[in-house]
Image (tube, rainbow, N blue to C red):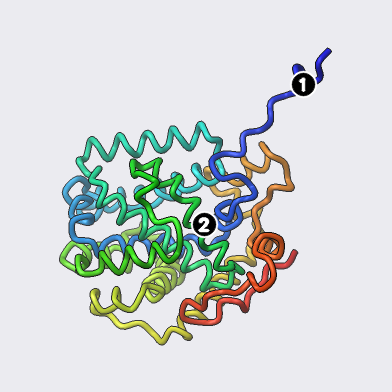
Amino acid sequence: MNPEATAPPAADPGLFGPESVTWQLHGDPVMWIAGVRALYLQALHPRAVRGVMINSTAFNEKRGQRDAWGRLLRTANFVGTISYGTAEAAEAAGARVRKIHRLLGVDDPELLLWVHCAEVDSYLSVARRSGIPLTDAQADRYIDEHRTSARLVGLDPDETPATVAALDAYFAAVRPQLAAGADAHVVDDFLRRPPVPPLLGPARALIWRHVAALAYDTLPPYAHELYGRPAPPPETVTHRLVATANALRSIPARLRWRLPPGHILNAMARLGPATRPAPFKLHRQAAILDGPGGAQQRSDGGDSTRWRTPG
């Protein structure tokens, strides 16, 4: 009997797989701060944020304000699915997003590209600045990997930045189109003081306010100028980000990952415990893949090398 004929099929690693930068990076809790930063940045494109405002009640009226929380959670669920779900689940999630974009009339490639780049830039920038040991080569790999997520939302991967340099060039080109209009300030108001049930008021004051302020402070200087609110000096922001990230990382990972819908725990059950995502693995990969002298890091406004995850 041919043993290959009876061997069970290999588990589906998904679109990225355990060897990817995305796999190791997206399991870190600092990604929540990065996600809020992305919303701040995305709102600075007047056409993109207007499309959200026209087609959704997300940022006005009580029902709409509740929907805004839903949008945040749906975005987090989408990122978790494409990062750790099976390839089939990721493709299905992408199909749902493309359908929604078509129905709402917000499938303009220019706007989709802005949303994609603002999100990827926020994840990468906050991760590096919080101390995750990403080399420049790994940062490029991360940007390149997310041409896959660009395809899922309806973009042409060949027209999507594949390196940090290409991403920087994109932002330089789009910068003259950005402005903090009335819609951007509605988003800003929501993120600074989102509506919550009375019992959650203290948590909003103690936790969310800090997260939202830190996400805003990590924006590039031109974004602070457009919003009209200054940020602390870059070194101060980096220090606060590292301290906050370390506090979040002190919560046991398996406890954090039990929050619904449990993408990471499901992936580990599917592929085995050795696939547990951990940023410190990126440091090991750098020694193998980047070669001598390849483990240099970009500062991004402060010393991003001061944190190390224990093995």
Decide: is 205 above or below 272: below
Residue 219 in the image: x percent, y percent? 37, 72
| SS at circle 2 | helix
Residue 117 in the image: x percent, y percent? 36, 58
Residue at the disc numbered 2: 142
Residue at the disc numbered 1: 4
Residue under the image location 39 percent in, 76 percent down:
217
Q: Nearer the viewer, residue 70 or 221?
A: 221
Q: Tell me if 96 is positioned left or right of 189 in this view.
A: right
Decide: is 235 above or below 15: below
Residue 286 in the image: x percent, y percent? 66, 64
Residue under the image location 26 percent in, 79 percent down:
225
Residue projecting furthest to the right: 1
Residue 260 in the image: x percent, y percent? 53, 45
State the CA–CA distance, disc 2 to disc 1: 34 Å
- For residue 303, which numbered disc appears in the image? none
Q: Quadrant of the N terminus?
A: top right
Q: Amino acid at mark 1?
A: Glu
Q: Is residue 178 visible?
A: yes
Q: Residues within 10 Å of mark 1 (few under 14, many from 20)?
A: few
Q: Nearer the viewer, residue 211 or 309?
A: 309
* Residue contact at pointers 2 and 1, CB within 8 angstroms: no
Q: Quadrant of the C terminus?
A: bottom right
Q: Tell me if 271 is positioned left or right of 219 in this view.
A: right
Precedes in sequence: disc 2 or disc 1? 1
Q: Amino acid at mark 2?
A: Tyr
Q: Tell me if 280 is positioned left or right of 215 in this view.
A: right
